[in-house]
Image (cartoon, rainbow, N blue to C red):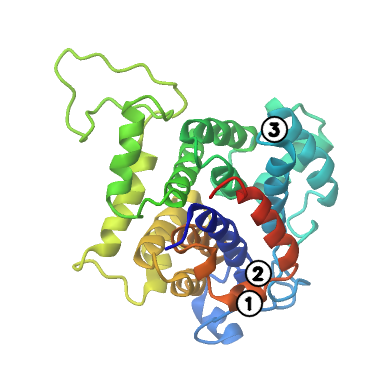
Amino acid sequence: MSNKRDRAKGALMGAFIGEALGVGPHWYYDLDEQRSEYGDWINGYTKPKADRYHDGLEPGEISQQGWIIQLMAEFLVENGGYDETLFCKMIDDKILPHLDGTPMGGKGGYTSQVMRHLFHTRVKLGLPWNQVASTSDTSESLERNIPTAIYYADDLKTLSNVIAENTALTQSDNVTGSLSVAFNLVLAMLINGEPLDESISAKLMKKVHKGELPFHAVTSSNLSAPQKGEKAKPNEGLFASPDALLSPGYMAKAAFDEDIRIEPAWKVSIVYGMPCAIYHMLPAAYYLGARFADDFEAGVLNALNGGGQNQVRAMLTGALIGAQVGFSNIPKRFVDGLKDKERLLEIADRLVEKYS
């Protein structure tokens, strides 16, 4: 049985591993093309083909988004937590100088829509930070805040507020914000030893009704109607509904329901969608994270082999399963195959050192 520190380390290293696994076969929407390039089953780290999204990287190397996650982990450790002013300075000083605003011109391969927009508004237009958020509906901010969920796993209210604040800096859509917070709340719950099953949503909803999480809800604790004449409880107003917290429970229930089978499991990408939007990514990651709760290898490889936005799918699945099995139960070959693994392991250990 893994301890909390081991689970927290597993969450971060699981995310790095999933991100690196996707470097080669990233964004093949034609699965026949993916298989012609990489074979019927991708079993580990691969080199990107020429003129693909991460051309120039080596097998096991993290790409730009993995580097940003690494910087976020280092930022939290060095500053003893999150501070918005210091975060903005970190982006300005350490990330934007390595980008050029084009999809393929930045450090570590492909640059996300969020970061391209940020480069344009901050560097080209010189806009202040309160005017630079994009309308992108991807999971970029969610991914960036995986270390935040790990750092604040003992304080879900602070975790929620910090991630909501940080997401709003770069992504203006409220639904994207709520989904980003919800995923990282689930990740923190797993680090704290909760199982990824259908009960996880009810546990989160109890915290909503206690005013601990910034989601609006008018139903009772079991989702039944409020009493006639009962006033809605004042809430902290960030998110209009708690639905983002309800999704993981339904996805987990589907994973355990004997009458619902996605076979082979990589076809989760077809069921929930291959594109990049956050509402395609999260259901697949929750499903795989629940179904393969004790099998890191099976979970991340099924996420990877589904094609499309498989890098994010594998990253999020890797974080969820890593938080359940713990770092000690991630197959050694995935850790050994990571480029710059010593640096990544060092920052992971520093991020989780406060846990026992």
Residue pointed to by mark 2: 23
Give neighbour class at mark 1: few <14, some 14-19, many 20+ (Cα, 10 Å). Answer: many
Q: Are marks 3 and 2 in contact (CB under 8 Å)?
A: no
Number of labels in the image equals 3
Report x, y in % for residue 324.
Answer: 44, 59
Residue 110 in sight here = no
Give neighbour class at mark 2: few <14, some 14-19, many 20+ (Cα, 10 Å). Answer: many
Q: Nearer the viewer, residue 63 or 50?
A: 63
Residue pointed to by mark 3: 132
Whole-angstrom CA distance, mark 3 to mark 2, is 28 Å
Image quadrant of residue 240? top left
At x 28%, y 41%, the residue is 202
Q: What secondary structure is marked by label 1?
A: loop
Q: Nearer the viewer, mark 1 or mark 2?
A: 1
Using the image, tell me which numbered label, if any, was put on residue 108.
none
Residue 199 in sight here = yes
Q: What secondary structure is marked by label 3?
A: loop
Residue pointed to by mark 1: 45
**In the picture shown, does residue 147 fall above or below 217?**
below
**In the picture shown, does residue 334 fall above or below 184?**
below
Whole-angstrom CA distance, mark 1 to mark 2, is 8 Å
Report x, y in % for residue 87.
Answer: 72, 35
Quadrant in which the N terminus appears: bottom left
Q: Nearer the viewer, mark 1 or mark 3?
A: 1
At x 52%, y 36%, the residue is 159
Instruction: Please name the amino acid that badge 3 sits on.
Output: Val
Report x, y in % for residue 97.
Answer: 85, 46
Q: Nearer the viewer, residue 39 or 163?
A: 163
